[in-house]
Amino acid sequence: MYNWALARSLGGAFVLRIEDTDQARSTDESLQIILKGLAWLGIDWDEGPEFDAGDRTNGGGEFGPYFQMQRLDRYRETAAQLLASGHAYRCYCSTERMEKVRAEQKANKSTFLGYDGHCRNLTDDERTAYEEQGIKHNLRFRMPVDRVIVVHDLIRGEVEVNTKQLDDWVMVRPDGVPLYNFACVVDDVDMLITHVVRGEEHFLNGIKQNLVFEALGHECPEYAHIPLILNQKGGKLSKRDPGVKSTLEYRDLGYPPEAVFNYIALLGWGFSADRDVFTRDEMVAAFKIGSVGKAGAKFDVTKLHWMCGEYIRQWSAEQCLVRCRQWLLSELPEESWDKHAGWLRNVVACYQERVQVLSEFPEKIQWLLKDPELDDAACKSIKKRSDSKQWFKGFADLLETLPMAASFPADRGDADEAVRLPTREGQPEPESSFATPAALERAARQWAEEQEIKFGHFVGPVRAALTGTNKGPGFFDVVFLLGKEACVRRLRKQAEL
């Protein structure tokens, strides 16, 4: 995201490169998570794989291929160049030998842990002997001995590192497949990369890569190593931490993509001292890589959910209905969107203030679609009032006399006037119709007054009988959305129980 924002703010090109040399982890499934996940968040790339290309085709851009496994000839050519110049050498050490070396270093509490340079200065005869035994070799980069490297990091500033801290690292495995620190340098050279933004765990990799650029006679890109995202305990965030999901899991659960984008953008960077909600365009206009903080930010799933709710509440009822359609289709038939559009808009409008992700809608509206089982809170609310049974019967009798909508899902046709009533002021309303929550409320309050019932005591048990819980939309929205027949049936049923 920060690479994307930096490229957009500077008028550069954002390059999506698939580093797939770890074949065990580089599956088509993981590729689709990258391509579809970025597209869902609105992070578009100027060069890289074509989004619709399910196969690993080159994609768009003149500096491809953008899959590293399609660039092996280029890595082979560059590795030979470094071998010839003495910046790389062949290493015949086995895995067993390296494990033994590391164990000895740890046992001796050595300040240096890494490759001991065993093959760094082999003679031609020694190399020939290994080859004749059929021993495969890695290619290692020959690190300078005791040299201070000064790196300018766009976030950390000037940093000095002595090469004594780093060992001669493997560039290319015996099978000819390059490792990260070598392959990405070749790619950066060929693709004319000017800036690289990545996590701070790559800082020492930046030192190694800087030396490879130098060995190849090319200028190193500018690096910005951003702080890690942390869990609530202050450790590095992992997929096992609460609330952490893959991008496509957030999509499938109905997190608004603009809210997820907004929240992630704030994990290390601030848009404004007095504002957390902003658009992509506003981020691009305000983004400066030097403004990214040096300290890690904690991932807070509660704030992410709050952010999602903020975005959902900004939508019109019509927009919200469109956005949550795929989840509601699990409970409602396709034809509902044509036959009962007004009723559906009213349902969605009642819950916009009460959901944080769109996949919550189906469960929220279950009470509308079938007679609910009473939860503990509903039972307690009903039993608390000794007159509940009489109230249920009396209110059912009243509803039968009112010219309100007969039953779900009657389409009112004036749904926009009914959305979130009675809280909206100045809405026109038919004098003789009980078609809106506001008109229904007047009749109900008048009836309660005539029956000498305290309206505040009456609402809780009746709503519990209708919805099965003590939570949800306002009382008159509940009655309006259910319709006459369903309300009367449920109230009489609960009176009997």
Image: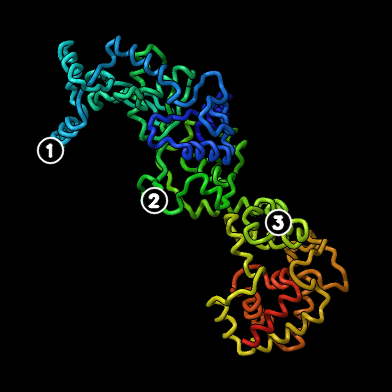
- Residue labelled with disc 3: 334
Which quarter of the figure has residue 463?
bottom right
| Numbered circle sitting on residue 157 | none
State which tag comes first along the sequence, 2 or 1: 1
Pick the residue in front: 57 or 409. Answer: 57
Model colouring: rainbow
Q: Position of residue 10 (x, y in %)?
A: 56, 25
Q: Amino acid at mark 1?
A: Ala
Q: Residue at x 74, y 88 (%)?
A: 451
Which of the two marks, 2 or 3, is nearer to us in this view? 3
- Residue labelled with disc 2: 240
State which tag comes first along the sequence, 2 or 3: 2
The secondary structure type at the circle numbered 1 is helix
Q: Amino acid at mark 2?
A: Arg
Q: Residues within 10 Å of mark 1 (few under 14, many from 20)?
A: few
State which tag comes first along the sequence, 3 or 1: 1
